[in-house]
């Protein structure tokens, strides 16, 4: 039996539900597919599709807190729900209470008329529009922490070649083309003098 992951108290999203469906089945409403692994970018599953439904931590009281994979014929642990079988292994999950956070306390203290966040989100910000083809909507959309961050070069770095200074890296001095030509200039005067001092070659009559 192997643990995949456990819910943490730092994330703002929680896992509300899981489904294991065939590749040809329609994606359930409100679910997003797990297409590939995060580290190697390989397909997560080859014969099935694992779908999950996410929601905000501050808007729910229970969520998936543990996922287990065990042999198909082993005894199912109490309070675990089996979502299906893959390669003779059962995939199970267990629901648990969501630990309250500061955001949850603020949300619960708000009047009902000011609560704009539903308890269970039918759609996720990570899911594409359902009006697009299923092959496109099934791709997972993620937002990087570097998105919309402008990239500029610091003012302390020179921008023109004229402002560049000589750099000495491990005793190696970087020189310009003019400096190299001046240092290694060679006029071939010795070769020319030898050529003029040689006797003329005899001519054939």
Image (tube, rainbow, N blue to C red):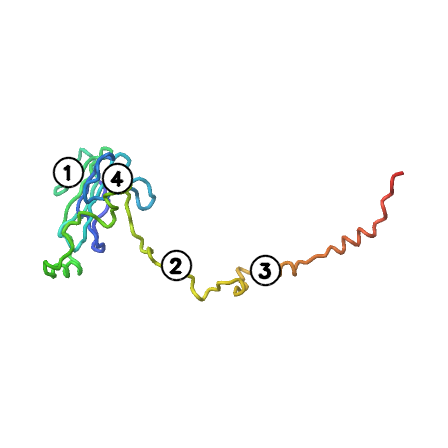
Closer to viewer: mark 1 or mark 3: 3
Q: Which residue is mark 1?
A: 76
Q: Position of residue 166 (x, y in %)?
A: 55, 63
Is 153 placed left or right of 3 in the picture?
right
Asked whether disc 1 touches disc 4, contact meaning CB atoms under 8 Å apart, the reply is no
Asked whether disc 1 touches disc 2, contact meaning CB atoms under 8 Å apart, the reply is no
Q: Which residue is mark 4?
A: 134
Q: Which residue is mark 3?
A: 176
Q: Earlier in the sequence, mark 1 or mark 3?
A: 1
Closer to viewer: mark 4 or mark 2: 4
Q: CA distance from mark 1 to mark 4?
A: 34 Å
Q: CA distance from mark 4 to mark 3?
A: 58 Å
Secondary structure found at label 2: loop
Q: How many marks?
A: 4
Q: Earlier in the sequence, mark 2 or mark 3?
A: 2
Closer to viewer: mark 1 or mark 2: 2
Camera-side residue of 15 and 133: 133
Q: Position of residue 93 (x, y in %)?
A: 17, 43
Q: CA distance from mark 1 to mark 3?
A: 74 Å
Secondary structure found at label 3: loop
Q: Position of residue 195 (x, y in %)?
A: 80, 51
Going 33% across and 41% down the picture, which residue do you hit? 42
Q: Which residue is mark 2?
A: 151
Q: Quadrant of the C terminus?
A: top right
Rendered position, 49 above or below 55: above
Rendered position, 163 above or below 78: below
Going 33% across and 55% down the picture, which residue do you hit? 147
Which residue sits furthest right?
205
Asked whether disc 4 touches disc 3, contact meaning CB atoms under 8 Å apart, the reply is no
Is 190 placed left or right of 166 in the picture?
right
Rendered position, 127 above or below 159: above
Q: In which quarter of the view is residue 89 placed? A: top left
């Amino acid at each position: 039996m192997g643990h995949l992951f456990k819910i943490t108290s730092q994330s703002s999203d929680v896992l509300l539900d899981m489904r294991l469906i065939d590749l040809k089945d329609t994606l359930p409403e409100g679910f997003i597919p797990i297409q590939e692994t995060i580290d190697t970018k390989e397909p997560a599953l080859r014969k099935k599709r694992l779908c999950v439904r996410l929601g905000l931590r501050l808007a729910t009281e229970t969520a998936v807190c543990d996922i287990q994979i065990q042999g198909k014929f082993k005894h199912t642990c109490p309070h675990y729900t089996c979502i299906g079988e893959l390669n003779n292994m059962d995939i199970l999950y267990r629901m648990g209470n969501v630990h309250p956070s500061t955001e949850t306390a603020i949300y619960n203290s708000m009047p009902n008329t000011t609560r704009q966040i539903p308890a269970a989100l039918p759609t996720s910000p990570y899911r594409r529009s359902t009006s697009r083809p299923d092959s496109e909507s099934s791709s997972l959309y993620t937002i990087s922490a570097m998105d919309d961050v402008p990239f500029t070069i610091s003012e302390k770095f020179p921008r023109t070649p004229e402002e560049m200074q000589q750099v000495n890296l491990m005793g190696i001095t970087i020189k310009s083309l003019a400096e190299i030509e001046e240092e290694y200039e060679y006029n071939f005067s010795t070769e020319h003098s030898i050529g003029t001092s040689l006797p003329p070659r005899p001519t054939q009559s």
